[in-house]
Image (tube, grey):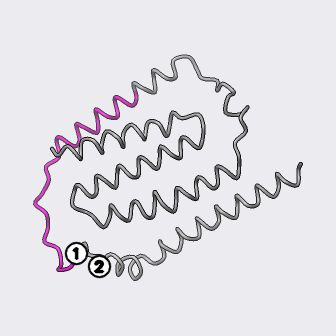
């Protein structure tokens, strides 16, 4: 296995754990950016350069900047972060055991799977032109729904900030 793949996979896994474990929301978002960049490195190592670049530009660039913008605007209160969350006795160990069982099940499923030979693809498959045609002709509704979802999220943040400012 390529050493770039191993390093990128380890970084992606570590960053994903940090996203969940971080107590400060900005640290969680920054760990998510590292995770997305590591996934882009995996795409590039697997010779899917276009998908790797799109991963960096769209997700690590645009979407994560919007997340940082939302977290900064909402300004999570320090006392809410520092407050200890109540946990049930044994909750962390049971969660860890469940994660190990899920990992074992996934590895068993992957190792037992037989992979067929790749099917022949049409000429130009994987090019920017084919990707653009699929995105803007075949899946234009999904693209517009994603844009609507992002716009609703930004408007929701503005409304929340306006309500907070009125309450002061």
Q: State the residue in front, 7 or 122.
A: 7
- Left or right placement of residue 151 versus residue 21 in this view: right
| Residue indicated by mark 2 | 130
Residue 145 is a magenta residue: no
Tell me if label 1 and label 2 are in contact, CB under 8 Å.
yes
The residue positioned 39% from the left and 76% from the top of the image is: 135
- Left or right placement of residue 89 versus residue 7 in this view: right
Is 47 rendered above or below residue 147? above
Residue 89: x and y in percent read 56, 16
Say how many tags the image has: 2
Residue 102 is a magenta residue: yes
Q: State the residue in front, 77 or 120.
A: 77
**Disc assigned to residue 11:** none
Q: Quadrant of the N terminus?
A: top left
Disc 1 packing (10 Å; few <14; some 14–19; many ≥20): few
The residue positioned 64% from the left and 24% from the top of the image is: 86
Q: State the residue in front, 112 or 19.
A: 19
Residue 151: x and y in percent read 62, 68
Marks 1 and 2, how far apart at CA: 6 Å
Is 144 rendered above or below residue 45? below
Q: State the residue in front, 65 or 132.
A: 65
The residue positioned 30% from the left and 43% from the top of the image is: 9
Q: Secondary structure at mark 1?
A: loop
Q: Which badge, 1 or 2, comes first in the chain's sequence?
A: 1
- Left or right placement of residue 22 versus residue 16 in this view: right
Hey, which quadrant is residue 27 in on the image? top right
Q: Magenta segment, which residues? A: 98-124
The residue positioned 76% from the left and 55% from the top of the image is: 160
Residue 109: x and y in percent read 23, 41
Residue 104: x and y in percent read 28, 32
Q: Secondary structure at mark 2?
A: helix
| Residue indicated by mark 1 | 125
């Amino acid at each position: 296995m390529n050493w770039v793949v191993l390093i990128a996979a380890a970084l992606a896994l570590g960053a994903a754990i940090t996203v969940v474990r971080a107590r400060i929301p900005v640290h969680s978002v920054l760990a998510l950016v590292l995770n997305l960049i590591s996934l882009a490195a995996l795409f590039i190592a697997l010779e899917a350069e276009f998908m790797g670049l799109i991963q960096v530009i769209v997700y690590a660039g645009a979407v994560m900047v919007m997340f940082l913008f939302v977290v900064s605007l909402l300004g999570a209160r320090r006392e809410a972060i520092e407050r200890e969350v109540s946990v049930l006795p044994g909750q962390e160990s049971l969660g860890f055991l469940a994660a190990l069982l899920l990992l074992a099940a996934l590895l068993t499923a992957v190792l037992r799977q037989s992979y067929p030979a790749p099917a022949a693809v049409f000429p130009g498959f994987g090019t920017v032109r084919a990707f653009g045609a699929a995105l803007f002709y075949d899946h234009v509704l999904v693209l517009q729904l994603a844009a609507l979802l992002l716009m609703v999220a930004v408007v929701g943040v503005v409304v929340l900030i306006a309500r907070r400012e009125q309450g002061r």
